Structures are given as structure tokens and as C-alpha cells.
Amino acid sequence: GQNIDQPTEMTATEGAIVQINCTYQTSGFNGLFWYQQHAGEAPTFLSYNVLDGLEEKGRFSSFLSRSKGYSYLLLKELQMKDSASYLCAVRDGWSNDYKLSFGAGTTVTVRA
Amino acid sequence: GAVVSQHPSWVICKSGTSVKIECRSLDFQATTMFWYRQFPKQSLMLMATSNEGSKATYEQGVEKDKFLINHASLTLSTLTVTSAHPEDSSFYICSAREPGRRGGGNEQFFGPGTRLTVL
């Protein structure tokens, strides 16, 4: 199984930067995903990391260190619409069916 | 591209009845779809992996006779909650992967979810 940990809640001010950390302990690893989920809606894909390093996509960046079992999602220039839950998910080691295990999610609240 | 739909978006039913939820990939073929359940303020819990043309693979603790999954075509998977009880009330979400998509193909695309309330 997978053990995926991320903070429960974070609060930040509009225009600021927030970093959401995710640590994982897995029997195998084949990719880490970040999803955004607004209340009552389905998750939407943000980023995918399988190699170490930083992936930048607009205001959002995601970092991975496989040796440390660690990732973070960086949200820059925060906007009110970024208030949501952010889910860290890990793909099973060598599963051919691409199963994902999700963390409990980090609720980010952006204040004016 | 990579749009997944679900129907219905919400349903209220009486205890003991069965409810069917459909998951469709609208613009791609999905040999594999996934069914999740999410309780309030909790994360997504994988229930089962739905494989086109074969039996679903259920996660530990999920009753396969209670949650019937059928993946009859490359664009449709159904989840039937049989003899529903109030504790089955939850947000059910399906997802699908678009294999062979240029530049990706690893991420899952989620449907909008179905909120089930069992009275």
C-alpha cells in the first residue's frame, strides 16, 4: 500500500505564494500527480512528475525528489479562485492499470 | 479533449433500492476506468478498476456483489449500487485514462461526480 501525507489546511493572502508539501512511502513508484478539487466538484489535473526536479506550468509548479519521497506544489500569485483542496496522488510501482493512491488533500483558503 | 461525463449528477433513493451510475468517455476510448468514493472532507478512495470486456478488479474491503461494475464498451462503464443503505450515501466519481495520448497519457481525467443520498 501507499502512505501519503500532506497538511490538512493552509491559508494565504491573495497575490502571495503557497507551497503544499507531500511525502509518500510506497513499495514502488511510477509517478506523482497533483489535482485541484473545488468543493462538490471532481478533481482536475494540475501536474505530473516522474523524474526528479521542477515542472513549471504557469502559476503552478511541482517538484519531486524520489530519493526523499517528497514533492511540493507551488502556487504563485494566488487568486481567490485558487481556494480549493489540492490532492497529492501516487501511481503504484509497476501497475499496468495506472491505479492512483490519493492523500487526504490540503484545503487552501485564499484571503483578500 | 479527454472529457469524461457522469450521469446522473445527483440521485436520492430509498433504502433497499438499486442505483445505476454511468461514466462515459466522450472523445476518447478508455480501456480502463476507475471508480472512487469520497465522503465529506475526505480524500478519494479507489473502489475498483473497471476493465473493458473483463471483470472489474475491486479494492480490499469493497463488496463486489454490492457494487456491480460493468464496462461493456470502450466508452462506457456503469456502477450499480445494489440494495443501497444510508451509509452508502457519498460522492461517487469515475475517471479514465486516455492511453497513447501525445505528450501524456498518464493522468486520469475525472467525471463531474454523482452525489448519492440514500434515505
Image: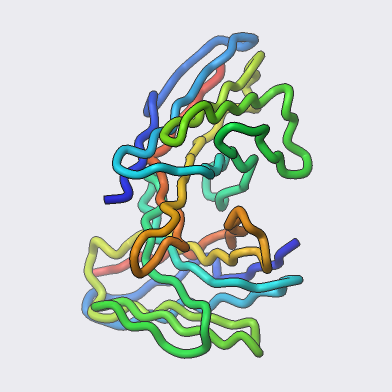
Q: Position of residue B112 (x, y in %)?
A: 37, 40
Q: Position of residue A32 (x, y in %)?
A: 53, 71
Q: Nearer the viewer, residue B18 or B56?
A: B56
| Location of residue A107 (image quadrant) | bottom left
Q: Is residue B28 left or right of residue A101?
A: left
Q: Position of residue A5 (x, y in %)?
A: 63, 70
Q: Nearer the viewer, residue B119 or A89?
A: A89
Quarter of the C terminus of chain B within the rendering: top right
Q: Which residue corresponds to the image point at 51% horizontal and 43% vertical from the top-left?
A: B31
Q: Nearer the viewer, residue A50 or A19?
A: A50
Q: Is residue A95 above or below residue A68?
A: above
Q: Nearer the viewer, residue A104 or A28?
A: A28
Q: Which residue corresponds to the image point at 62% horizontal and 77% vertical from the top-left?
A: A23
| Location of residue B66 (image quadrant) | top right
Q: Is residue A83 left or right of residue B110?
A: left
Q: Which residue corresponds to the image point at 56% horizontal and 49% vertical from the top-left?
A: B44
Q: How is the image coloured?
A: rainbow
Q: Which residue corresponds to the image point at 55% horizontal and 19% vertical from the top-left?
A: B118
Q: Position of residue B50 (x, y in %)?
A: 59, 38
Q: Is residue B46 left or right of residue B1?
A: right
Q: Is residue B46 above or below residue B115?
A: below
- Total number of numbered discs in the rendering: 0
